[in-house]
Image (cartoon, rainbow, N blue to C red):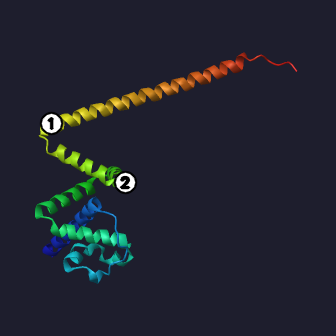
Amino acid sequence: MVRRNRLTVANYAATLAATILLMLLGTPVLAQEKIPWTDLSLEERTILQQVESQWDSLSAERQQRLRRGANQWERMRPQERQQAQSQQQRFQNLNRQQQQVINERFQRFNRLSGEQQRRLRTTQRRFQNLPEARRRELRERYNQQIQQIQQERRIQREAAQQIRESQRRVQQIRQQNRPVNPN
């Protein structure tokens, strides 16, 4: 029983990790035909077993993406699979708001052109290859710049509010100083 539960948890984790990987590596689907469950290989069915009951109701595009993700999962080395599962677990442990921020960033990334995505991935890779001390320094500098921008925006909002308030007072004074028309 314990072994079966471990396998179920492992399969579930593998499916979740494959789904995340799919979301990260998803590309537009050219063929829009649904895939019968029986057309999947044994390995694909094993990886995707968590979605078997919903398979027929999934869109063709979703089926294609899941299949590509399963194939990608099959090609991954054990260390890469473990890393994907770890990332999925970290995501699951985040609160809803944090998950939503990540999903929004993911969607924004997917709306970028292929060239922009490539540049971002290259930049991320270069950052990851830096020594930890340099990455920490860059993060601190980035956070300082963000704080400075936020402070400047606060000042701009306050100045805009003061200008609106001054304009409102000027209008009130003008209204009060208008000559009364005797009719």
Q: 30 and 81: which one is in front?
A: 30
**Can you identify the residue that label 2 sits on?**
111
Mark 2 / mark 1, whichever is N-terminal: 2
Q: Residue at x 30, y 73 (%)?
A: 51
Count of numbered circles in the view: 2
Q: Establish if 101 lies above or below 84.
A: above
Amino acid type at circle 1 is: Arg
Work out which residue is located at the far front of the displayed protein and give it.
Answer: 115
Q: Residue at x 25, y 79 (%)?
A: 40
Image quarter of the N terminus: bottom left
* Residue neighbourhood size for the residue with mark 1, other residues' Cα within 10 Å, grouped as few (<14), some (14–19), many (≥20): few
Image quarter of the C terminus: top right
Q: Residue at x 50, y 27 (%)?
A: 160
Q: Residue at x 17, y 39 (%)?
A: 135
Q: Tag 1, which secondary structure? A: helix
Between the residue at mark 2 and the residue at mark 1, the CA separation in whole angstroms equals: 30 Å
Amino acid type at circle 2 is: Arg
Work out which residue is located at the far right of the displayed protein and give it.
Answer: 183
Q: Position of residue 37 (x, y in %)?
A: 30, 81
Q: Position of residue 46 (x, y in %)?
A: 21, 76
Q: Position of residue 179 (x, y in %)?
A: 77, 16
Quarter-of-image position of residue 63: bottom left
Q: Establish if 47 lies above or below 82.
A: below
Q: Position of residue 95 (x, y in %)?
A: 31, 52
Left or right of 81 on screen, residue 153: right
* Residue neighbourhood size for the residue with mark 2, other residues' Cα within 10 Å, grouped as few (<14), some (14–19), many (≥20): few
**Can you identify the residue that label 1 sits on?**
134
Work out which residue is located at the far bottom of the displayed protein and give it.
Answer: 38
Q: 74 and 98: which one is in front?
A: 74
